[in-house]
């Protein structure tokens, strides 16, 4: 069963809210806000697929809300349909210039509202799919390096990291070159996929972001866990890969596929560049590999 799209209505006119609710509630999940001071935070707090905004609310504050929505990276991609009692071409042009995808004047026809809403939701669905495809690694189906870098930068500069914790963990398959040479690259791809899924399941349990870092390495990033939890995550990952028991008779250290894990952890936030943190995680991974399929966590 297809999940109903979430529509957020920003309007302080009770009649408009009632009419829009009657038109849309049967096919969509609706959220409402009438206070300009809180509506953007509420949009962020809910999974929002499309916004219907009355630009005339609060003495014209709707235009300000629209401008803020389009300047915020977390809400920029949400389509906004403006509903207004103004038939001024200047107001319509202003709304579209600020980033609205459509402009509907009052009184509005229910059929027109539903049809335009349907069209814009279909466009958003296609755009979301394209965005997902360009952000995924084709082999492992995990977020690719571009998406991973975006998430690392966002977490590093976010409020959670500013309050204290930030970690980058690199996970690498041990002696994977010899695995490919012995079993063949097709089996190597299958192995990478299975390991990726095991890592993804473990990361999900701890609400940690994971992506493919490069050929044989994966990266996990978090801005919410202390050093003890990071250690537990690393051990859980190590155990999850071992539990797969994928044969690797060409490995000099283990009869099955294993991983080495290196991490860098900041307990008290410091002004460090992402590249510097990655270098620290990389050196931690090298230390783990020296000890042969172990975990090494560097705390800064």
Image (tube, grey):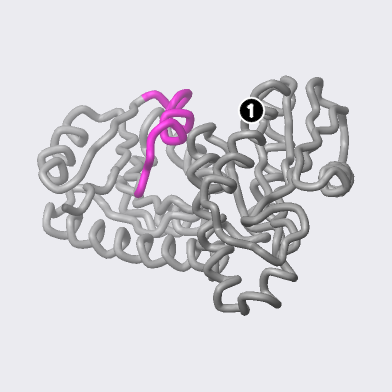
**Could you tell me which quadrant the C terminus lies in?**
top right
Residue 210 in percent (x, y) is at: 60, 47
Q: Secondary structure at mark 1?
A: helix
**Direction from residue 3 to residue 120 in the image, left or right:** right
Give residue 40's position: percent from left, percent from top: 47, 33
Residue 131 in the figure: left or right of residue 254: left
Count of labels in the image = 1
| Depth check, front residue: 71 or 121 | 121
Residue 222 highlighted magenta (yes or no): no
Residue at point 66% right, 64% down? 249
38 versus 259 height, above or below: above
Q: Is residue 44 above or below residue 83?
A: above
- Tell me the residue at 79%/22% (across/down): 267
Q: Position of residue 131 (x, y in %)?
A: 50, 63
Taking the image as shown, residue 96 lies to the left or right of residue 279, namely left
Using a 10 Å C-alpha cutoff, classify the residue at mark 1 as few (fewer than 14 neighbours), some (14 to 19) or many (20 or more).
few
Is there any visible trace of residue 244 in the rendered image? Answer: yes
Residue situated in front as seen by the camera: 102 or 61: 102
Q: Nearer the viewer, residue 58 or 183?
A: 183
Residue drawn 52% across and 53% down? Answer: 98
Residue at the disc numbered 1: 232
The residue lying at 35 percent from left, 48 percent from top is 49
Tell me if residue 44 is in the magenta stretch. Answer: yes
Placement of 248 over or under 82, stated as above or below: below
Q: Which residues are magenta?
A: 35-49
Residue 215 in view of the camera = no
User: Residue 228: x percent and y percent?
Assistant: 69, 21
Using the image as rendered, state which of residue 2 and residue 182 is in the foreground: 182
């Amino acid at each position: 069963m297809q999940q109903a799209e979430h529509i957020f209505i920003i309007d302080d006119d009770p009649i408009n809210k009632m009419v829009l609710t009657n038109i849309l509630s049967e096919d969509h999940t609706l959220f409402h806000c009438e206070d300009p001071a809180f509506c953007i935070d509420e949009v962020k707090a809910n999974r929002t697929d499309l916004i219907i905004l009355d630009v005339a609310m609060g003495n014209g504050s709707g235009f300000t809300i629209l401008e803020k929505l389009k300047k915020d990276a977390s809400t920029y991609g949400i389509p906004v349909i403006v509903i207004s009692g103004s038939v001024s071409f200047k107001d319509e042009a202003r709304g579209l210039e600020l980033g609205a995808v459509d402009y509907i004047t009052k009184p509005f026809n229910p059929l027109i509202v539903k049809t335009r809403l349907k069209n814009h939701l279909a466009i958003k669905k296609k755009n979301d799919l394209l965005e997902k495809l360009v952000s995924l690694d084709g082999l492992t189906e995990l977020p690719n390096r571009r998406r991973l870098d975006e998430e690392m930068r966002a977490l590093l500069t976010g409020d959670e990291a500013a309050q204290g914790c930030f970690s980058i963990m690199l996970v690498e398959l041990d002696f994977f070159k010899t695995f490919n040479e012995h079993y063949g690259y097709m089996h190597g791809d299958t192995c990478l996929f299975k390991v990726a899924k095991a890592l993804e399941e473990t990361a999900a349990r701890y609400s940690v972001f994971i992506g493919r870092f490069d050929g044989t390495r994966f990266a996990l990033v978090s801005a919410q866990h202390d050093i003890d939890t990071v250690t537990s995550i690393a051990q859980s990952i190590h155990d999850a890969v071992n539990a797969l028991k994928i044969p690797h008779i060409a490995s000099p250290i283990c009869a099955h596929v294993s991983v080495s894990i290196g991490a860098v952890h900041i307990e008290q936030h410091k002004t460090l560049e992402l590249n510097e943190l990655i270098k620290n995680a990389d050196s931690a991974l090298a230390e783990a590999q020296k000890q042969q399929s172990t975990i090494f966590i560097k705390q800064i």
